[in-house]
Image: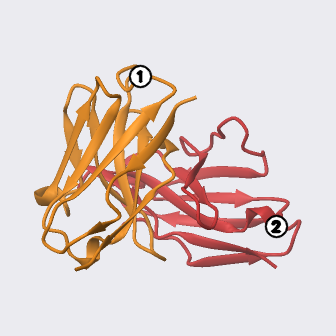
Chain colours: A orange, B red
Amino acid sequence: QVQLQESGPGLVKPSQTLSLTCTVSGGSISSGSYYWSWIRQPAGKGLEWIGRIYTSGSTNYNPSLKSRVTISVDTSKNQFSLKLSSVTAADTAVYYCARDSGEVSWFDPWGQGTLVTVSS
Amino acid sequence: QSVLTQPPSVSGAPGQRVTISCTGSSSNIGAGYDVHWYQQLPGTAPKLLIYGNSNRPSGVPDRFSGSKSGTSASLAISGLQAEDEADYYCQSYDSSLSGYVFGTGTKVTVL
């Protein structure tokens, strides 16, 4: 079955750009009508959808983060990536990647998550 | 900025039935968008529990059930077990935000 795994630096300095990659295994990122999403969760708090990408390259972003977010896909590596610019301590969270099952749908499966701390 | 409201916590004794509400608005649940539910055990990623308002993925016990009416949805857990102690989140789509939204989350405690 499809599995997702996040990777990237665990520590980012304020004002810099957070960069994470999600590697998809057990299936092609291009197969099926799936979108690929990023979701985050600050410690002790709820879930926030960041945005998603379709394998064609089309994207949708959370309006509250849109000015700072870029999601891209590399089908040759079966990966998709997140860049979040001008980070502050408020961006400290566990970041998850997940498969989005359609136009307006649910998330399954999820990666295990990776903690990113914004601190100098 | 959660736009779906859930009770912060619910509790019940083993074997009891508990329900978790998820209240939205006319731009999300009330607009006809489906509601999905996730279970998050401590220290782990969320796991899909219910999709499309009331459907259980393979492997999810039938103790878990979901429903939707108007601008709200509910998750019910019957025959509560110690392993059900976790955080639960609802999720839908919001047309005014043009994106996905999650509920505020509910912690279920088994007494």
Residue occupied by mark 2: B82
Q: In this view, does A50 lie to the left or right of A95?
A: left
Name the secondary structure under disc 1.
Answer: loop
Q: Quadrant of the C terminus of chain B?
A: bottom right
Q: Mark 1 lies on which chain?
A: A
The residue depicted at 35 percent of the width and 64 percent of the height is A10
Residue type highlighted by circle 1: Ser
State the residue lying farthest toward the right.
B15
Quick one: label 1, few (<14), some, or many (20+) residues within 10 Å? Answer: some
Label 2 with label 1: CB-CB less than 8 Å:
no
Output the chain of dot 2: B
Reply above or below: A104 against B30: above
In the rendered image, the quadrant that contains the N terminus of chain B is bottom left
| Residue at disc 2, secondary structure | helix
* Amino acid at dot 2: Ala
Q: Residue at label 1?
A: A28
In the rendered image, residues at marks 2 and 1 fall on the same chain: no
Q: Residue at x 73, y 77 (%)?
A: B11
Neighbour tally class for label 2: few under 14, some 14-19, many 20 plus, Cα within 10 Å: few
User: Which residue is at a point 66% across and 40% down the rendered structure image?
Assistant: B56
| Image x and y of residue B8, in percent | 56, 78
Q: In this view, does A1 lie to the left or right of A89?
A: right
Q: Nearer the viewer, residue B20 or A113?
A: A113
Pinpoint residue B94: horizontal percent, then vertical percent.
32, 53
Q: Is residue B106 left or right of residue A88?
A: right
Residue B2 visible, this orientation: no
- Which image quarter: residue A1? top right
Q: Nearer the viewer, mark 2 or mark 1?
A: 1
Q: Distance between the residues labelled 2 and 1?
A: 37 Å
In front of the other: B2 or A34: A34
Residue B85 coordinates in the image, percent (x, y)? 72, 68
Q: Which residue lies furthest to the top in this view?
A: A31
